Image: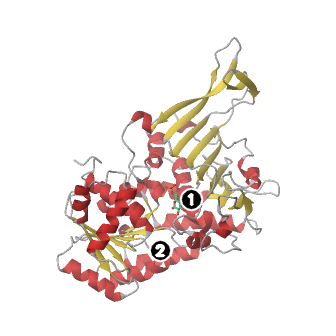
Amino acid sequence: MSTLEVRIEEPVTFVISGASGDLTRRKLIPALYTLFKEGALAGDFAIVGFARRDYDNHSFCKLMADALREHSRTTADEPSLKAFCSHLSYHRGDLSDPAAYTGLKAKFDDGALPQNRLFYLSIASELIESTVTGLRNAGLITPPDSNPWTRVVVEKPFGRDLPSAKALNRMLLDHLDETQIYRIDHYLGKETVQNILSFRFANTIFEPVFNRSYVDHIQITAAETVGMESGRGAFYDQTGALRDMVVNHLFQLLCLVTMEPPDGLDARSIRNEKMKILRTLKPANASKHHPAVCFGQYGGDEKTAAFRAEERVSPQSKTETFAALRMEIGNWRWAGVPVYLRTGKRLAKKTTEIAIQFKTPPLSLFQHVACRGDVCDLTGVKPNTLIFRIQPDEGIFLQVSAKRPSMQMVVESVNMDFSYSGKWDKALPEAYERLLLDAMRGDSTLFTRSDEVEAEWEVLDAVLAGAPESEPFVYAPGSWGPAEADAILFSNGWKNE
Ligand code: BG6
């Protein structure tokens, strides 16, 4: 058994289309290397880097070994790097040239590569069609349910609105069966994200209070301190926070924390429940004083370039680098409970968390205090809050009120904590390790189905339809976003921590 408890015995070839990109160096190769080192790739396996750059097997291996020394979470020791490199090769070709695919097919036909094939499309969305068509025309795609199998992993963005997402799905489904398509959303591979389901449905004490009778509101935050590192300016200027983070990662978190219990843990049951949430999700009713949407863009200071001054970003850019939304779920369980979403670049700290704030008790019997050491001030009632901390310091925290030791009957908010690092000394697996392993095993539970993607865009279109025409509000780098977002985010008493 591998140290990851799961291993693949089948032979498999993992082809990375667009292998010269940053994702290959930072995420894909490090994830494959860890799977290899931990014994999860137990059968015959080959990794083929496919791109236009002028590398050969030797220079590609060298480049990947350097990437592993920099990015691998498991030790990149020389003997294992050498062993890993013996599975790597490079196929040079232009992704829009049919000859590149016939050349690749010849390598499969020669028997040089294991026949089961997983194509990872780490490419710009404009290239997806020519790549999938190239694979199909060269005979590289085997029929669904056949042996050897073919699977294609598609990276986001899956389109930029509903019509383009539909067109992309139609094109993919012209060449492949839905069961062969793995749309990756790396948030679903995060250990703590999967723990949302086990926490909710493996315990009896929380589920009965996860509804509109007990929950006041839900807040989902994905804050980042980074800006446009790794030359991402051009991509991000075209994309923005809504399309980069909200329509996929944040909506997926929202679904997992609010969906009904699934019939089972199989892909179909879980995706069906997420779909029911997406069908009823919409921006909350807005008024002039209580908006539902606010966009921001980071300005600069003496140390940090403003978004508009970043490399390959238009100096007149109106792209949002911050978004705050007030959403509602129109189903029986959640009707009337606001769900606040917030994400942004260059914010005060890197944190991703889901906070479920419960209603306050019907009668306030106690005085509530907040204390620093022995100095205490009276505060309002502190409601119970359950926090799923996705990253960093992964864990689950429940804030409750407890009597403060003193001669007076006063209560103070305290934490009941479960932290991964406190319970297990093992490092958490990287999202990509889990997802690549699942794709190679043919488990699509943690990937997004075509109808989910379309439903996500439908919700986003509704958000955009109600969004203000005005330019995004400028916010200071290192802050929590524009002050104008407070009217959305803090109307229920939430505070930045
Ligand atoms: C990616 C976005 O999907 O997620 C990036 O394209 C973002 O802009 C990243 O930085 C955040 O991922 P994580 O795992 O660091 O929260």
Q: Residue at x 80, y 57 (%)?
A: 287
Is label 1's Cβ within 8 Å of ligand 1? no
**Residue 443 visible to an observer of this rendering:** no
What separation in Å lies between label 1 and label 2 (alpha carbons)? 18 Å
Establish if 319 lies above or below 331.
below
Name the element at disc 2.
helix
Outermost residue, front side: 302
Q: In this image, 297 relative to 290: left or right? A: left
The C terminus: image quadrant: top right
Which amino acid does the dot numbered 2 rest on? Asn
Percent coordinates x, y for residue 142 in the rendering = 28, 76
What label does residue 406 carry, if any?
none
Residue situated furthest top in the rendering: 407
Q: Badge 1 is on which residue?
A: 278
Which mark is drawn over residue 169?
2
Q: Position of residue 80 (x, y in %)?
A: 24, 56
* Residue 411 on image: x %, y %: 67, 22
Label 1 sits on a secondary structure element that is: helix
Seen at 45% across and 80% down, the residue is 127
- At a point 38% along the width and 84% down the height, the residue shown is 94
Query: Which is more N-terminal, label 2 or label 1?
Result: 2
Residue 93 x, y percent position in the rendering? 34, 83
Q: Nearer the viewer, residue 57 or 283?
A: 57
Under mark 1, the amino acid is Leu
Crowding at mark 1 (Cα within 10 Å: few <14, some 14-19, many 20+): many
